[in-house]
Amino acid sequence: MEVVAHLIGLIICAIGILVGLIFFVSAINDAKRSRKSLWSKTSGTILSSEWEEKTNDELQKYYRHSISYQYTVDGKIYSSNGVRLGADSIITHNLDRATEVALMYSSGTHVTVFFLKAHPSTSVLEPPTLNATIIRNAIFGAIILITVGFMVYLIVKDLIL
């Protein structure tokens, strides 16, 4: 009887793992599709690039880098200061990173601009991180499925014995 319980539990765990992997692969494909279907890219030019050293409430230094740029979509010129989705500046505590950003986004530099296809005036310089969110959720879902599969295995094992 114990062998049957273990076998049933292992089958349930295998199904949980398989379903978790299916969700994981599906989430990766969804992320690729959504990024391609929502966002497009074009070339742009940095108009201004300024960074300043600041101090927070805990008296820690940080560097805030503000950037404005211009780009063209379907013959229309747009200007923006969006760096990442929801952020109009880059903030770092690392002076080396601040220097790197200043060089990467210096005035006159040609850059790749990502814009929403449906609303070309919404743009960012750094690609949207929707993929990371979907992958993180997929991994979390897979862990839950595996855990539930193992819990069911333990329950079935105890019921049969």
Image (spheres, rainbow, N blue to C red):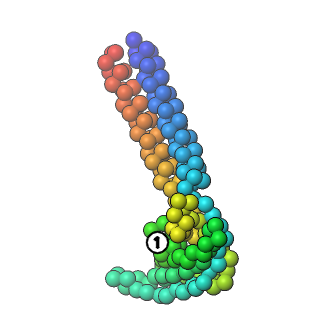
Q: Provide residue 144's location: percent of width, then percent of height.
A: 41, 39
Q: Provide residue 107's location: percent of width, then percent of height.
A: 63, 85
Q: Can see residue 25?
A: yes
Q: Provide residue 101's location: percent of width, then percent of height.
A: 59, 78
> What residue is rendered at 46% in x and 72% in y?
87
Amino acid type, mark 1: Ala
Which image quadrant for residue 50? bottom right
Which image quadrant for residue 61? bottom left
**Does 130 sit above or below residue 137?**
below
Between 43 and 5, the one lying in front of the other is: 43
Task: Tell me if 104 is positioned left or right of 6 in this view.
Answer: right
> What residue is rendered at 53% in x and 59% in y?
118
Give the SS element for disc 1. Answer: loop
Q: Can see residue 94?
A: no
Q: Residues within 10 Å of mark 1 (few under 14, many from 20)?
A: few
Q: Which residue is mark 1?
A: 87
Task: Tell me if 97 is positioned left or right of 3 in this view.
Answer: right
**Does 17 sit above or below residue 97?**
above
> What residue is rendered at 31% in x and 18% in y?
159
> What residue is rendered at 57% in x and 75% in y?
78
**How many labels were placed on the picture?**
1
* Residue extending furthest toward the top: 1
